[in-house]
Image (cartoon, rainbow, N blue to C red):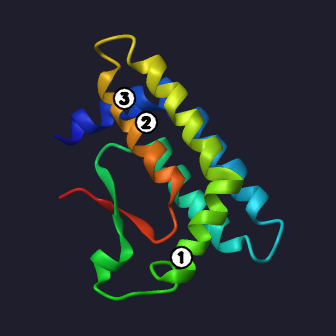
């Protein structure tokens, strides 16, 4: 199974993962300009890494994973997600959706398009989410 994941991740990297991963990292660098944006920037680098190699990983709520509420899963996290959506989330989601449309053109690209759509949803509200290996 891991060989198949490697093949899918390499094909993904070529079919839009590289471009969108760089977009996430660029947004992360922009977030590091202000002190308030540093947590957003850190999250961008984690999500960018997922955007480079998504197969074999999934995103989950930190509250579900740990069973405890933290600053990102409470009301401050909701406010952070609203700010995120207005500044960057909408644009990253559009990038993933455009890549998904391009991948849906061929039958082989359908799994990649579905992954782009999952990342588009994640890019709208990433605060309070984390990345784990699939089991």
Q: Can you see residue 16?
A: no
Q: Is residue 125 left or right of residue 131?
A: right
Q: Quadrant of the N terminus?
A: top left
Give me the C-alpha separation between circle 2 and circle 1: 24 Å
Residue that numbered label 1 is attached to: 77
Horizontal relation, residue 6 to residue 17: left or right: left
Q: Viewer-proximal residue, 34 or 97? A: 97
Q: Where is residue 122 in the image (x, y as percent from the top left)?
A: 45, 52
Vertical order, 51 against 37 (above or below): above
Q: Are marks 3 and 2 in contact (CB under 8 Å)?
A: yes
Q: What element carries label 3?
A: helix
Q: Mark 2 points at which residue?
A: 116
Local packing at callout 3 (Cα closer than 10 Å; few below 14, some 14-19, many 20+) is: many
**Image vertical order of residue 23 relative to residue 107, above or below:** below
Residue 28 in the image, given as x and y percentages of width and height: 69, 57
- Residue 116 rendering spot, x and y as whole percentages: 43, 36
The vertical placement of 113 against 49, above or below, is above
- Image-based side of 20 in relation to 108, left or right: right
Mark 2, secondary structure of its residue: helix
Q: Distance between the residues labelled 1 and 3?
A: 29 Å
The residue under the point 43% across, 67% down is 129
Point out the image quarter for the C terminus. bottom left
Quarter-of-image position of residue 6: top left
Q: Which of marks 1 and 3 is nearer the N terminus?
A: 1
Q: Earlier in the sequence, mark 2 or mark 1?
A: 1
- Residue on which disc 3 sits: 112
What whole-number distance in Å separates the C-alpha atoms at marks 3 and 2? 6 Å
Residue 14 x %, y % = 49, 25
């Amino acid at each position: 199974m891991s060989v198949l994941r490697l093949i899918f991740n390499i094909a993904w990297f070529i079919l839009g993962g590289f471009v969108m991963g760089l977009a996430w990292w660029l947004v992360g660098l922009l977030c590091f300009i202000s002190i308030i944006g540093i947590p957003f920037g850190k999250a961008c680098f984690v999500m960018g890494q997922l955007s480079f190699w998504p197969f074999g990983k999934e995103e989950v709520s930190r509250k579900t994973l740990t069973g405890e509420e933290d600053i990102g899963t409470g009301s401050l996290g909701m406010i952070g997600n609203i700010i995120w959506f207005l500044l960057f989330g909408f644009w990253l989601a559009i990038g993933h959706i455009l890549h998904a449309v391009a991948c849906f053109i061929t039958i082989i690209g359908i799994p990649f398009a579905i992954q782009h759509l999952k990342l588009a949803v994640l890019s709208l509200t990433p605060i309070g989410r984390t990345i784990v290996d699939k089991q």
